[in-house]
Amino acid sequence: MADPVSWTFLLAALAGGYLLGSIPFGLVLTRLAGLGDIRNIGSGNIGATNVLRTGRKGLAAATLLLDGGKGAVAVLIAGMWGQEAALAAGYGAILGHLFPVWLRFKGGKGVATKLGLLLAISWPIGIAACLTWLLAAAVFRYSSLSALLAAALAPLYAWFLPLLWGSAGDPQLVWFSALLGALVWFQHRANIRRLLSGDEPKIGKRKAEAAG
């Protein structure tokens, strides 16, 4: 068990990651662009997929980069105090994005933030997850399905990729990836229902009732 000082650092990393992760870049950028409240557009989600439904690809790309970047920055800063602090900050960042206190705990779905976290904590896992998303998006054209597949496969990447260069998988990274994936799946439960019923909109499609 970690000593009291270690727990202090871990809690500070968790809190700092939460505050950084809770910055709603999609909401901020769309308001600055004069588009109003993104929560009144499309699915009402604050993430990049819903920003794309405004027709502003640049804003969607900026939202994607900033949402991923805030996760990466949280991990990299906390990582100066070790991997456990980095993981704590990562957990905090995705919780902040999903449940931001500023928005009454109704945030995004965590896909970009999760990918940013993985890239920062272990770039091979992050790249594999990003490639999974891109490949699935190219084949199926569903952002939600791509996110679900990337989230499900990330723990496997965390375990098996190190074997390629002769080292064992890090159980902490496996559990970290699995927990992030579980949160992403939880946030996509409405999308899962629409995928099963055939009502899920494809990437780039504008639809008032669509989910991002």
Image (cartoon, rainbow, N blue to C red):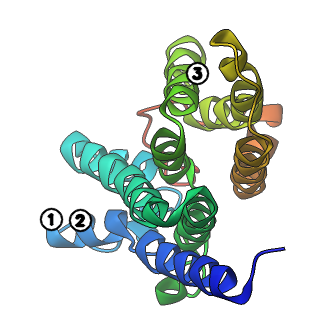
How packed mark 2 is, by other alpha carbons closer than 10 Å (few <14, some 14-19, many 20 or more), is some
| Most foreground residue, 205 or 81 | 81
Q: Nearer the viewer, mark 1 or mark 3?
A: 3
Q: Are marks 2 and 3 in contact (CB under 8 Å)?
A: no
Q: Circle 1 sits on which residue?
A: 33
Q: Nearer the viewer, mark 2 or mark 1?
A: 2
| Most foreground residue, 198 or 78 | 78
Residue at 76% over, 40% down: 174
Q: Are marks 2 and 1 in contact (CB under 8 Å)?
A: yes
How packed mark 1 is, by other alpha carbons closer than 10 Å (few <14, some 14-19, many 20 or more), is few
**Element under label 1?**
loop
Q: Is residue 89 left or right of residue 77?
A: right
Q: Circle 2 sits on which residue?
A: 29
Find the distance from the CA under tag 2 to the CA under tag 1. Answer: 6 Å
Q: In the image, what residue type sits under mark 3?
A: Thr
* Residue 159 can be seen, yes or no: yes
Find the distance from the CA under tag 2 to the CA under tag 3. Answer: 27 Å
Q: Nearer the viewer, mark 2 or mark 3?
A: 3
**Element under label 3?**
helix
Q: Quadrant of the N terminus?
A: bottom right
Q: In the image, what residue type sits under mark 1?
A: Ala
Image: 43 above or below 115: below
Of pointers 2 and 3, the one earlier in the residue sequence: 2
**Element under label 2?**
helix
Looking at the image, which residue sits at the far left?
Answer: 33
Residue at 58% over, 30% down: 125
x then y, percent, for residue 200:
65, 37
Q: Circle 3 sits on which residue?
A: 132
Q: Are marks 1 and 3 in contact (CB under 8 Å)?
A: no
Q: Is residue 56 left or right of residue 91?
A: left
x then y, percent, for residue 29:
23, 65
Residue at 55% over, 73% down: 96
